[in-house]
Image (cartoon, rainbow, N blue to C red):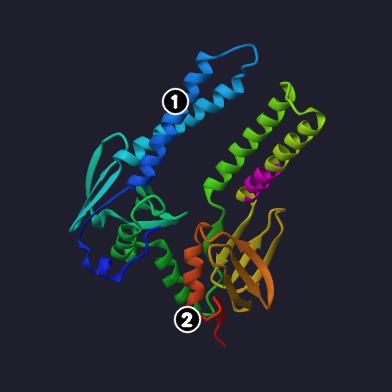
């Protein structure tokens, strides 16, 4: 990832800029698309009695998915010019709108979704686009960011302690994790069945190792999918309500949150009274909102923890 440079940011035009996907990401998916096409051609040209439709489906899915993403990364473009913006989607369709038409911006995994009312106008992915341009976009539209609006609501509720408890946001596993878990579960189960249908070299020991590997992968994918469907943290004006993967919920008043540990390149861990109450990926939906809420009452120490002011 490109390191942010203060001089670069200051030199950028904050009123007129263009956001596109990184050329390196586009090149990667072009290569994957070519590889997928080659595998599809190979499976069709060299079919025999040992060929299986699951392999054909796997190769075609790889090709079709990477081809669609290649079109998206090659053609998508956002142009901001003063008080207007122009968006070009993967089909080449161009639409120009006034910035005032944007009503809200919701954070997603590594990016954001831009809305006009309830209608999604476009989506920006900060992981595949220029991080400086993405930061510039977030700064320009800060007042429309849903997380900032949530922070303002939270501050108002804290200023009025007699106000009844109300929901602010919900932290949940990224939808991509659910999709990956489901596809991974189906794929690994398919491969587990497949390797037991065909004859493999290596005897019983080899079969045991292969079966064990696919079984472990299947269990991991099942856990990822179930966590994506069930696990969540409901943030209210007075408490965090955490539901684990078994569906059990526990309430933790905001004032009990003692600190937040952020591991470098790893997970975020919430503590209440010195006891760990939740662990999740920093890309979790609405983590930025919860972080803003906690930062209204916490301070970061030199050890990388966030401790509550007393």
Q: Main secondary structure of the magenta part?
A: helix
Q: What percent of the width, then of the height, locates residue 298?
A: 52, 80
Outermost bottom residue: 310
Q: What percent of the width, then of the height, locates residue 158?
A: 50, 78
Q: Which contiguous range is marked in magenta?
A: 219-227
Q: Is residue 48 above or below residue 131?
A: above
Task: Give yes or no for residue 221 being in the magenta stretch.
Answer: yes
**Along the viewing direction, whichever of 168 and 48 lies nearer the viewer:** 48
| Quadrant of the drawing holding the N terminus | bottom left
Could you tell me which residue is drawn at 22 percent across and 49 percent down?
97
The answer to whether the residues at label 2 and label 1 have Cβ atoms under 8 Å apart is no
What mark, if any, has residue 37 been given in the picture?
1
| Quadrant of the drawing holding the C terminus | bottom right
* CA distance separating discs 2 and 1: 60 Å
**Circle nearer the viewer, 2 or 1:** 1
Which SS class for mark 2?
A: helix
Could you tell me which residue is drawn at 59 percent across and 72 percent down?
261
Q: Which residue is mark 2?
A: 159
Q: Is residue 217 left or right of residue 159?
A: right
Which SS class for mark 1?
A: helix
Q: Is residue 85 left or right of residue 268?
A: left
């Amino acid at each position: 990832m490109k390191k942010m440079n203060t001089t670069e940011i200051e030199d950028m035009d904050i009123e007129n800029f263009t956001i596109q996907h990184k050329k390196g990401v586009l090149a990667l998916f072009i290569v994957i698309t070519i590889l997928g096409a080659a595998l599809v051609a190979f499976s069709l040209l060299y079919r025999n009695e040992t060929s299986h439709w699951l392999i054909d489906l796997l190769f075609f899915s790889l090709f079709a998915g990477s081809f669609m993403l290649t079109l998206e990364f090659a053609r998508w473009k956002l142009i901001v010019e003063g008080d207007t913006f122009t968006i070009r989607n993967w089909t080449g369709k161009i639409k120009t709108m006034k910035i005032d038409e944007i009503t809200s911006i919701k954070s997603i995994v590594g990016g954001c979704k831009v809305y006009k009312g309830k209608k999604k106008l476009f989506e920006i992915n900060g992981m595949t686009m220029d991080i400086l341009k993405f930061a510039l976009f977030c700064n320009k539209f800060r007042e429309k960011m849903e997380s900032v609006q949530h922070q303002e609501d939270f501050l108002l509720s804290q200023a009025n302690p007699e106000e009844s408890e109300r929901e602010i946001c919900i932290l949940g596993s990224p939808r991509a994790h659910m999709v990956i878990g489901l596809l991974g579960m189906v794929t690994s189960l398919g491969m587990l069945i497949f390797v037991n249908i065909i004859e493999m070299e290596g005897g019983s020991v080899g079969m045991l190792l292969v079966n064990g590997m696919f079984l472990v992968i299947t269990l991991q994918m099942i856990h990822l999918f179930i966590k994506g469907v069930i696990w969540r943290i409901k943030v209210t004006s007075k408490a965090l309500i955490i539901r684990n993967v078994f569906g059990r919920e526990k309430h933790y008043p905001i004032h009990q949150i003692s600190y937040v540990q952020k591991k470098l390149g790893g997970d975020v861990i919430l503590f209440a009274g010195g006891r760990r109450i939740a662990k999740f990926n920093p890309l979790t939906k609405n983590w930025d909102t919860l972080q803003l809420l906690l930062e209204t009452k916490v301070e970061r120490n030199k050890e990388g923890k966030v401790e509550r002011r007393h």
